[in-house]
Amino acid sequence: MATPQLLIVSSSYSDTDRARLEAAAPSLSVGETTEIAALSEAQRAGITVAAFKGHKPFGTDVMALLPNLKLIANFGVGYDSIDAAGAAKLGIKVTNTPDVLNDDVADLAVAMLLACCREVVKADAWVRSGDWGRKGDMPLNRKMSGGKLGIVGLGRIGRDIAERFAAFKMDIHYHSRSEKQTPGWTYHADVVDLAREVDFLVVALVGGAATKGYVSREVIQALGPRGIIINISRGTTIDEAAMLDALESGAIAGAGLDVFLNEPRVDPRFFALPNVVLQPHQGSATVETRRDMALLQLENIKMQLAGKPLVTPVN
Ligand code: NAP
């Protein structure tokens, strides 16, 4: 049997995705990076490519266990679990799966803000529970269209989110590290100024150490009691304790959250809040997009194995 060259790091690939990966090269499989140390020295030495869809960190300590590793192909655009700078120093390339998921993540941001403003979840329960028949009409809720919307991080996904909300006749403001070419949207060099200006704040930053707590207690306070936060980025980008305090005290009006600090073990303080819409990190989780992400990851792996240029390198 040929020496396994490809290490599949995940317990959550679909049978189809796994079969495609296994067809690309002789492979070995582990559930998480923490299981790599248990492979034999000969097995680890044979690995040149890792297909990564794990949740545990892929740091240089793990990379050191794979002396011939040349590529970590990440499943997902966010690669904050991987030490990409450390990998570069070791001569290891990292790829991700950008763009193919923009539509789904942007759609979910819209869905969560609509759900918050129009109280879609509460309204569903109002009908289901029979309250509509017993109590009559639900109290009025809040208009979303035409509001003032701020995006924190006008990258690929942030821009797609802004374009969608522009179609809802909203006044679009954004903060990024540099001003972008935008169709009539307003740039704020300071994220606190952005929060002070808008009703709704959508966070679309990368995760990782550099953006930890970027939406700080000060930013949340600046958003004010009519403010709603939407987060589709990473749980780390917001000071979660400050956001919980603000949601509990009414310092902000609500939040729609797809990502959390200690997911999937979400802080139970969220569960008692009537003014939040909570999602299980499912921004890109459609059949169509997950297929496209798997194919892009596979394409990077095939290019590496063929000695050709990678499609979507990040380091
Ligand atoms: P992107 O195009 O690279 O945009 C990232 C944004 O983050 C840019 O606006 C960038 O600012 C900003 N940024 C990067 N480093 C920063 C720093 N050190 N300080 C401040 N801002 C910084 O990435 P994308 O494709 O839009 O994806 C964004 C993130 O969405 C991913 O990294 C991932 O974590 C998350 N995501 C979540 C889901 C989900 O299921 N919920 C799905 C896909 C992606 P500049 O404009 O100044 O460069």
Image (spheres, rainbow, N blue to C red):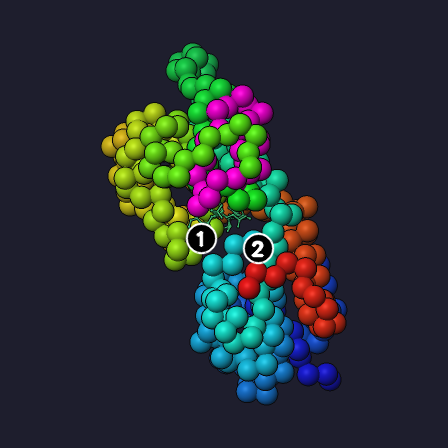
Query: Is 155 left or right of 269, judged from the image as shown?
Result: right
* Residue 259 in view of the camera: no
Classify the position of the N terminus by image quarter: bottom right
Which residue is painted at 47% across and 59% down in the image? Answer: 80
- Closer to us: 197 or 277: 197
Q: Amino acid at mark 1?
A: Gly
Q: Amino acid at mark 2?
A: Gly
Q: Is residue 176 magenta?
A: yes
Q: Residue furthest top?
A: 136
In the rendering, which numbered label is found on residue 60?
A: none
Number of disc labels: 2
* Residue 208 in view of the camera: yes
Q: Position of residue 290 (x, y in %)?
A: 64, 50
98 versus 121 height, above or below: below
Residue that carries the numbered disc 1 in the rendered image: 207
What's the CA distance linking mark 1 and mark 2?
A: 12 Å
Magenta residues?
158-180
- Closer to us: 124 or 198: 198
Point out the tag, 1 or 2, that comes first from the N-terminus.
2
Q: Is the C-beta of the residue carrying label 1 under 8 Å from the nearest atom of ligand 1?
A: yes
SS for callout 1: loop
Query: Is 302 left or right of 260, judged from the image as shown?
Result: right
Classify the position of the C terminus by image quarter: bottom right
Q: Position of residue 183 (x, y in %)?
A: 57, 30
Q: Is residue 42 magenta?
A: no
**10 Å neighbourhood of mark 1: few (<14), some, or many (≥20)?**
many
Which residue is painted at 68% across and 70% down in the image? Answer: 304
